[in-house]
Image (cartoon, coloured by chain):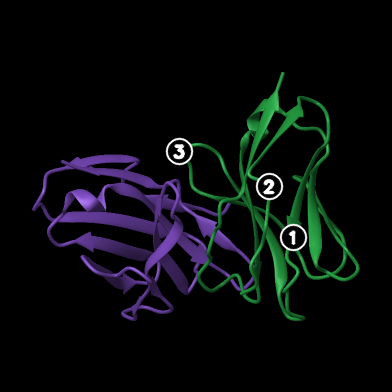
């Protein structure tokens, strides 16, 4: 599975959009971009995934660049409950084992 | 609503005790996983199972065993708990496109 690079931490004001970047320059053609988040002392929670088209669901939007070497997770109106560590992973089949790196610690501030 | 449940959120055991961590999923998934998560080390796979009575070692199986007698239940067993097994234990089950995690069990071995 391709390696990903994310900033260690980010701050966001409550109510504003949170844009979390992820670099995955070695992504293969059959690999998806997945985002999970982990709120303190809880299990990881699936957010969204995509292959090459932009995706949106009730939680977030995922923007993938045309060359697929990077992506951005967008939380359109961040709330305090969105404070968590966000993990970007690249994997061909999410049914297999997952490997989380350090992720981005997002702090949403009032 | 999909669910992965774990038998305990917090557990304190003594060195040498036998410890059972239970995981149950209600999504009829074939794939189930046990991970441990430690600060600075990310998520590490202990064991996984692709079917009833089937088990495969992950990256760090030493000191652990598992049992999958029924499709919905995957148990992690610490035969003789040691202090270096103090950790957050996460169970997950997966479809092809998504891995669902339980809330985690924080185990402390004294």
User: In the rendering, at what x and y percent does residue B64 appear?
Assistant: 23, 66
Question: What is the drawing colour of chain B?
Answer: purple
Q: Secondary structure at mark 2?
A: loop
Question: Same subunit under labels 3 and 1?
Answer: yes
Pointer 2 residue: A7
**How many angstroms separate mark 1 from mark 2 (CA)?**
10 Å
Q: How many marks?
A: 3
Using residue A79 as the reference point, say whether residue B19 is left or right of it: left
Q: Label 1 is found on which chain of the structure?
A: A
In the image, farthest residue toward the right? A66
Give residue B34's quadrant in the image: bottom left
Between B8 and A2, the one lying in front of the other is: A2
Q: Earlier in the sequence, mark 1 or mark 2?
A: 2
Q: Secondary structure at mark 1?
A: strand
Q: Residue at x 73, y 74 (%)?
A: A27
Pointer 3 residue: A41
State the mark number for residue A23: 1
Question: What is the drawing colour of chain A?
Answer: green
Q: Earlier in the sequence, mark 3 or mark 2?
A: 2
In the image, farthest residue toward the top? A110
Q: Secondary structure at mark 3?
A: loop
Q: Residue at x 52, y 63 (%)?
A: B27
Q: Residue at x 50, y 53 (%)?
A: B3
Contact check, label 3 and label 2, Cβ < 8 Å? no
């Amino acid at each position: 599975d391709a390696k990903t690079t994310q900033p260690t931490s980010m701050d966001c004001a409550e109510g504003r959009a949170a844009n979390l970047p992820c670099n995955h320059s070695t992504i293969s053609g059959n690999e998806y971009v997945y985002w999970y988040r982990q709120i303190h002392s809880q299990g990881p929670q699936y957010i969204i995934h995509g292959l090459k088209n932009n995706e949106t669901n009730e939680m977030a939007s995922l923007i993938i660049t045309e060359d697929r070497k990077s992506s951005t997770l967008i939380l359109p109106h961040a709330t305090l409950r969105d404070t968590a560590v966000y993990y970007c992973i690249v994997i061909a089949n999410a049914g297999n084992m997952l490997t989380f790196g350090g992720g981005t610690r997002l702090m949403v501030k009032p | 609503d999909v669910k992965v449940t774990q038998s305990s959120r917090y557990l304190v055991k003594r060195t040498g005790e036998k410890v059972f961590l239970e995981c149950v999923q209600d999504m009829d998934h074939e794939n189930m996983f046990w991970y441990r998560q430690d600060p600075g080390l990310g998520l590490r796979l202990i064991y996984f199972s692709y079917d009833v009575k089937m088990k495969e070692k992950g990256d760090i199986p030493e000191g652990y065993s598992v049992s999958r007698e029924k499709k919905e239940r995957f148990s992690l067993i610490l035969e003789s708990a040691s202090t270096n097994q103090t950790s957050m234990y996460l169970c997950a089950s997966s479809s092809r496109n998504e891995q669902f995690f339980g809330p985690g069990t924080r185990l402390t071995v004294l």
